[in-house]
Amino acid sequence: MHDAYEPVPILEKLPLQIDCLAAWDDWLLVGTKPGHLLLYRIKKDAGTNRFEVTLEKSNKNFSKKIQQLFVVSQYKILVSLLENNIHVHDLLTFQQITVVSKARGATLFACDLQQSSSGEAKLRMCVAVKRKIQLYYWKDREFHELQGDVAAPDIPKSMAWCENSICVGFKRDYYLIRMDGRGSVKELFPTGKQLEPLVAPLADGKVAVGQDDLTVVLNEEGVCTQKCALNWTDIPVAMVLPRYVEIRTLEPRLLVQSVELQRPRFITSAGSNVVYVASNHFVWRLVPISIASQIRQLLQDKQFELALQLAKMKDDSDADKRQQIHHIQNLFAFNLFCQKRFDDSMQVFAKLGTDLLPSDYRKQLHYPNPLPALHLVKQLNDSDPSTTSPLMEGTPTIKSRKKLLQIIDTTLLK
């Protein structure tokens, strides 16, 4: 394992219990159990991993019950589930814009923001009302019906958009609902022993779906996109574990880091590399360690595959990035060789075009004719002196028997 993130306290011992979170840019919204809505500005101190946290706005009469928050910064709106109905407020003033009257009795909603090729944003929303799923789209400061209601086999407990499908978790099973005009329903697999199903949207139009201590990644067809599931050390709660946040990679399947926190319950993102985690009375921000530092640590630990992935993510120039990737691949191949995985090692070296002979010797070698494909070399006895002679006059010879044997071994391997 290595350190990929540092947990930095943002709010500590908040007197009001946190029930939900939402974040965007430099802003953090906190919905509390008494119905207060708190808006914080989070500004990073230059050159440090510390933050200046300012309570910019507090609305004590926002609602009697704040169940869910979702920010759409492109439209400057806040979509929320308040007292089992869908409300839309202005993001800057908290003034109410509209209420979705048909959604009265709602227990859950999920939004999806799509960017068209022209750059225009399109907002869709699905709402769970008893055993039905309602579908809406946003236009002219209102939510309009996208298509007829879809009948569900049970009351949805968790759901997320997946391109043109919605993955829904019920008490016992996961289903996929297709947005094909007919609302086709496909049964996926059981939820497992966990009390609550868990469906979370991923950035690339896929969804992460939990089954006990496993998480699988599905596409809009409901097909698993990874060879193996992620295996957590405990059953996740809202993609965090009961005592800590676990950071894992899908390819290669590795546990990167365990961040111990006090009873985390919620996790939300404000964009790339901006992650907040909250318990009932605390909020932390997971600050990424610099990629250069992570790569150094990974190379020390011989985690070459993960180091390669991070090297491809760096903001360096193309030439510098290629040079570092080539260097890491050489180290990876050499490590394979040291593990006596000769075939794997040689394949990587061959792909890289790495010449294993020292450059000073390589420059001095001359042959009178093309070499045959195979050489038979008589093993030198340790007690015999090195009596090598050049193939062509004037070519320097190698006096060191150790270096000679190294070159012979390398040549035979190549």
Image (tube, rainbow, N blue to C red):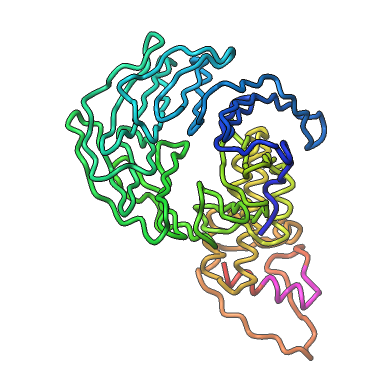
Q: Which residue is drawn at 50% across and 52% down?
A: 250
Residue 236: give x, y in percent of width and height: 51, 54
Q: Is residue 156 above or below residue 23?
A: below
The C terminus lies in quadrant: bottom right
Q: With 159 as the anchor, is 145 left or right in this view?
A: left
Q: Is residue 52 above or below residue 95?
A: below
Please say whether residue 399 is one of the residues in the magenta stretch. Answer: yes
Residue 107: give x, y in percent of width and height: 38, 35
- Front residue of 369 and 116: 116
The N terminus lies in quadrant: bottom right
- Front residue of 382 and 88: 88
The answer to whether residue 269 is seen in the rendering is: no
Please say whether residue 360 is one of the residues in the magenta stretch. Answer: no
Q: With 378 as the anchor, is 199 left or right in this view?
A: left
- Front residue of 220 and 226: 220
Boundaries of the magenta span: 397-407
The answer to whether residue 226 is seen in the rendering is: yes
Q: Residue at x 73, y 52 (%)?
A: 296
Q: With 128 as the anchor, is 279 left or right in this view?
A: right
Q: In this view, does 58 lie above or below 2?
A: above
- Front residue of 278 and 15: 15
Q: Which residue is drawn at 53% across and 54% down?
A: 351
Residue 392: give x, y in percent of width and height: 69, 65
Residue 376: give x, y in percent of width and height: 57, 80
